Amino acid sequence: MKLSFSPEDEQFREEIAGWLKDNLTGEFEKLKFRGGPGDEHMFPEERKVWEQKLAEGKWTCVGWPKEYGGRGLSIEQQVIFFEEYARAGAPGRVGHIGEGLTGPTLIAFGSEQQKQKYLPGIVAGTELWCQGYSEPSAGSDLANVKTKARFDEAKGKWIINGQKVWTSLAHESDYCFVIARTDPESKAHKGLGFFLIKMDQPGVTVRPIEQITGTSEFNEVFFDDAECDAEDIVGEPGDGWKVAMGLLGFERGVSTLGQQMAFQNELDEVVKVAKESGAHKDPVLRQRIADLYLRLKIMRFNSMRMLSDDVGDGSLQKEALIYKLYWATWHRDLGELAVDVQGEMGQVLDAEPYELTRLQSLYLFVRSDTIYGGTNQVQRNIIAERGLGMPKEPKW
Amino acid sequence: MDFVFTEEQQMIRDTAESFLAEVSTSEAVRKAMASDTGFDDALWQQICAEMYWQAIHIPEEFGGMGLGCVELVAMMEQMGRYLLCAPFYSTVCLGVNTLLLAASEEQKANYLTAICEGSLTATLAYCGPRGGRSADAITAKYREDGDSIVINGESSFVVDGMTAGLILVAARAEGSSGEEGVSLFAVPADTAGLERKNLPTLDQTRKMAALSFSELKIFAENRLGDAGNGWPVLDKALDLATIALAAEQMGGSQQLLDSTVDYTKERVQFNRPIASFQSIKHKAADMMLRVEAARSAVYYAACVADEALQNGPLANELAEAASIAKAYCSEAYFKNAGESMQMHGGVGFTWEYDVHLYFKRAKGSEHMLGNPSWHRERLAGVVLD
């Protein structure tokens, strides 16, 4: 075991930290610490411009292979990149779904044509993506997808009908990747396809969902005879589940360490507020703050194990299986602490009619963390079945 | 950055596991815990002679293996899994760590060599009869008397205090308080003026003693380190021992998870293994989460402990890493023990099943070397004050 970074890695750290210091200024100054989960609705246009600024510096898709426009960074340097990005308070990435999910999926499963058509726009920060998985009747039971894809021989295109839900950034996105049923007779994991669909077309309607925060970053997306080119299915019809599951593996990559730096920024703010309010003298709150502090540290150690332990076959080690349940629960606890350290003042809004402070927004938004991307209950099933070999539920 | 065991470390871990699975069976543990000494001396001699574990992180110049804390925690994890009853924790984690930090080269040559040979066991006596982890906990007093040191007072909760050949005693100069005036002394167990009393405890797998010193007289050269400046060194030694204890706690948590999952796969109710019920699966999943997080905390702390012994760049993280590991592993172990008992149902409440051994060890360990509240408060002090 070795924890330290090499001198080359430390030099790389200086390079990215320096770039951020020089560039996260002027028009971008106001974006600092903004646009993360729960704050996605803030400054979308400015953040799109920031995305292209990053691309100018070749700071998008840093983990992708060079041949696809990335930097092909080592795991260590990717870790450093995400840490420094978050440390600098650089804004939530509007391009993160394309960079983190679409790109790796196309690199792993896509055709040469798909790679050429879609990867450059992601690298350049000019084309944004959203994810079309969940449906009203396909939540935890994700395979229960009802959206249908029918191939129209005359048009030579796939025709998509159905509804997706909880689609973040759909209203800002140029494309959506969608799992839809290619075989209408099929059930569950079989007979699905994975489609790359252009958002700007008559058959696609986006409707924002008003959340408990009063803001909207999730959407419903309706497909009414939406069209998708024949070459824009990833893999074969019927491969959709395999591609979708492969993609879930990418969600546990090095960017988790960047997420933790953002968590650290949030915890720092809670500590600052606690010191102002006097909550830092309360013995119970001290214990809670220390508990959150140490559990965040452990989250980082766990990620370091996860990255060192990657055997490269896409299989998840035990420390990776617990990750979602661990961070989501931690974040929810932080949200509670964030209002509790403020006492009565924690209840007072920033402004009428319903303008939340950042910590109030955090408090409310974190309730979604233990639900989306596999609820805590689903995570526990996955851990028990895959991690511990316990039996699956009997079929009804 | 490479945060996994090397092949050699993995081998040490595997060897410990297979050896302990054979010698530290439930039957052996029960026999040891019912004995006066709390361990089987023949097994301890076998460990010293054949496995050479007691020498794991003693430098080669004193006859040791010259390995580090990562190797030590790899073994401690397995000892925790198999509830090994042996004077290993006291001798190596408390004794050797303290000697490595506090002793002069001459004292090291003297004591560490004997420990490597298997002819000496050791322990650390620091807190008074009220317990505690802060410097205030030290109540035994010393005064200088010509070339001698005279110690009076009490030290309690001394692990293997009844059997250890060498007792490292923390005492304070008369009239001193807090972190001032603390010194460490190497006190051979046969020194006149030392009285040892067995302290019967809920956890029978780890023997404790209460020591009293009345006009106990030793030579000044038995002092470890500078007079009165002992606290920072002792504090560091306690942190090293804490990290080893956390590893043991993590191993116990792992064993509880494994044995409980096995049990639920075999136990049939309502015509199905109870492992197929979500209420059971979700408890097991939470147990695994705690084990894995505990493991991450322990491995990190072990790397930091190595750096602390070698004054590496992360050396100043020692207190924090120890507190993180101890606070988390203590609660992980006890929660896993409680859940294990619940998931076993009635048999988990019997003397026959081993669950209660872990349940008791978990609570005992939780309160050794600072309980979770103490460690969280230490972290809070850094973050908030």
Image (spheres, grey):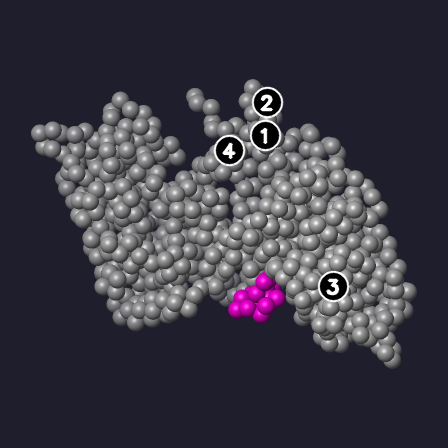
Q: Earlier in the sequence, mark 1 or mark 2?
A: 1
The kind of residue tagged 1 is Thr
Q: Which residues are magenta?
A: B305-319
The amino acid on which the numbered mark 4 sits, given as a three-letter code, is Gly
Q: Position of residue A389 (x, y in %)?
A: 51, 33
Q: Rounded to the nearest whole Å, what is the CA distance between mark 1 and mark 4?
A: 11 Å
Q: Main secondary structure of the magenta part?
A: helix
Residue B269 has which mark? Answer: 2
Q: Residues within 10 Å of mark 4 (few under 14, many from 20)?
A: some
Residue marked by disc 3: B113
Residue drawn at (24%, 24%) of the image: A184
Give the quarter of the image for residue B95: bottom right
Q: Position of residue A129 (x, y in %)?
A: 25, 48
* Whole-number angstrom distance, CA of label 1 to CA of label 2: 10 Å
Question: In the rendered structure, does residue B317 fall within the stretch colored magenta?
Answer: yes
Residue at the image position 67 percent from the left and 43 percent from the top? B20
